[in-house]
Image (cartoon, helix red, strand yellow):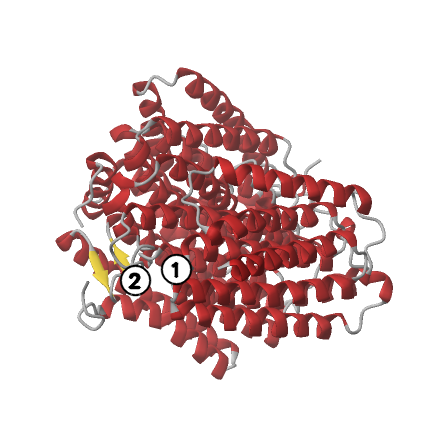
Amino acid sequence: MTDFLAGYNLNIMMILLCPMVGGVLVTLLKSKRRIEVITVVATGLILIQSFSLVGNVLDNKHIEAFDGIFYVDSLGVLLLVLISGVVFMAALYSINYMGRQYHNGILDDRHLLRYYQAFNMFALTMILVPLANNMGLLWVAVEATTLVSVLLIMLYVKETAIEASWKYLIVATVGLSLALFGIVLYYYANVVSDPTGSNDDKMNWTVMMKNAKLFDPDIVKIGFIFILIGLGTKAGLAPMHTWLPDAHSEAPTPISALLSGVLLNCAIYGIIRFYLIGHLVLGDGFLNTLLMIIGIISVGIAAASIYFQKDLKRMLAFSSIEHMGLVSLSIGFGGLFGIYGAILHIVNHAITKPLMFFASGTISQKYETKTISEIKGVIKTMPLTSMFVLIGTLSIVGLPPFNIFMSEFFILSSGFSSSQYLAIFLVISFLLVIFASFMKHSLGMIFGSPKKQISRGDLGILSIVPMAILAALTIILGFYVPEPLRQLTGNIVQMFGDKIINV
Amino acid sequence: MMPQFDLLAICSAILLITTFAVVARRGFMDWLNAYRYQSIALAGVTAIIAFVTGIWEIYIAAILTFVIKAIVIPKVFLRVTGGLAIKNKIETDPYISIRSSVILSALLVVFSYFITEQFPFKFDKVVNAFLPVSISMFLIGIFVMIVRKKTLNQVVGLLILENGLFLFATSLTHGISLIIEVGIFIDVIIGVIISAILMQRINYTFDSMSVANLEKLRDE
């Protein structure tokens, strides 16, 4: 065990300090312009720090810091970059979106202050998830994300927002209690497997991985079921997804983008961590079947709900359920393609879904409605935004040459190579339904002519820039995977393949 | 050693009785008192486990349990509910009647004792006494949350569930490390405060504390 100070890492400390300082400064300097700038700067610094951590991880494979409380490997750093990237985009987009709501009188100064405080805290709690080595800390961080995001959803004092936040709070907290139950079982298996050592570090993921061979398989099985149900609730996997469409559609749009784009991934990340441990104990069969079943159910439920959907943001929320289902399914298929596809899919979804949410937020501000049938002719009223919607839609339904096509291609081919023909058949038919209904809804909104007189013009440069960046990434990742990303995913695939991690 | 066994039995009895009080009573003050007594008993149990194992960190967890769960959280609730009409504090029309709820909860306790025997745990006195109790509390907490309409009652169910979880972790593994437990306590307090704010808003917006109002958001 290293000395606490010897395990000092400036990078990690900076990453955690930025949102804390941001939150404090926002509280102190109350004026609108200042708190916007502070939040953008704080999140920008987090993004820069995460990139430098990527370089560090690529050189050293993994970093342990602060006496083993924090541990970053390729999987962690990848999620960290996704989180900080989307948080930065959301901070930029917030200036326009929340500013517009402020000018329209929906929010006052107090609300705006509370929004930016919670925004910084939300960033902090999400960043803690991929950094945590102690699985108890991971749980505390995930539960904290629930609490902060509930605060953000109840920013509006509307009936629907209150209902969404209550459901979210109750369902997610009960779900996470189940997850903690499972985590305690893993911890117990670790304590029993090695009775001689001290129990201080037995909660650490690295130590669990080291002792995994000695775990009692039955306890791990029960524990994983609880963790899958618990973190699966947070990840929006069906049938525990009931809170998700409400919360995602009622939150302020930048927050919807964060919830869908990266918070779901935080929960999936937790599941992957425990899957990796369980995989060493139980091998392929049991865990993979569970993940596959839950994945197929999620895609199926999403398909049915998207088909009948009337609300724009709810449609996007169900699409998130679909994609999380695909990730779970892909891990269940396993193999080189399966894992590679799952990781790539997490990345692609985290890029494209915020794009769609930003665009939907801009559209619904312009049209003053979220009902799909009320929105027509976006291409005439907002030419630029409609281009982004088109790119996002084509990507999210899985058409080439966009990024999600690539990862879905890997996922389906991993299904064929592991000869899960029934699963493949079901998923392809669900995906076809989603394709048809999503295209119908989106094209109906983009083309045609507006029902009532709506002024022409996009909504400000700061709403366009984040969308443009994300759209560009959506296109680029469709045919080219950058070298660092390729290396990171390669390392992650090895973590699944080697079965033994080099600690 | 005999007296100690009795002490364990008495403590588990108190924990179970207080859990049942939440199921069997209709009024908010009864739930809150039940929760308070349960938390005091829980703090006692934690102190006993600390004494048996001789780990000083568990004593701190016991003190924290007492201060936060027996004093702070009930205070928060009393303050929040001070202005509420009496009709909002009484569970008049649960989804499952009180009588059936008690019977079902008793079945849940039997089920917990049955299920603990199936687990491949290493049993000792403490585990024997408290593991089935903790699982009962966990299950009955979830049960209360499902079958009751009043938001206050749901939160009390959540707290009972959390007590069960705490007892489970402490009796089985002698507590996960202190720093994590402090984190969990903070999460619980913040959760209670947020739920309190939300309950006030529900009361203010819907003029009622029943979750039956919360049915606007759905897909036809």
- Closer to the camera, A30 or B163? B163
Graded by Cα atoms within 10 Å as few (under 14), some (14 to 19) or many (20 or more), the crowding at tag 2 reads some
Is disc 2 on the same chain as disc 1? yes
CA distance separating discs 1 and 2: 8 Å
Q: Disc 2: which chain?
A: A
- Closer to the camera, A192 or A64? A192
Does label 1 or label 2 sit earlier along the sequence? 2
Q: Disc 1: which chain?
A: A
Left or right: residue A67 versus residue B179 is left
- Closer to the camera, B2 or B140? B2
- Quickly name the residue at label 1: A137
- Quickly name the residue at label 2: A69
Q: Is residue A396 above or below residue B49?
A: above
Report whether residue A383 is seen. Answer: no
Report whether residue A196 is seen. Answer: yes
x 53%, y 57%: residue: B5
- Are dots 1 and 2 in contact, CB under 8 Å? yes
x 25%, y 37%: residue: A496
Residue A19, image x, y percentages: 39, 70
Residue type indicated by callout 1: Leu
The N terminus of chain A lies in which quarter of the figure? bottom left
Left or right: residue A400 versus residue B212 is left
Residue type indicated by callout 2: Ile
Q: Is residue A309 above or below residue A455?
A: above
Graded by Cα atoms within 10 Å as few (under 14), some (14 to 19) or many (20 or more), the crowding at tag 1 reads many
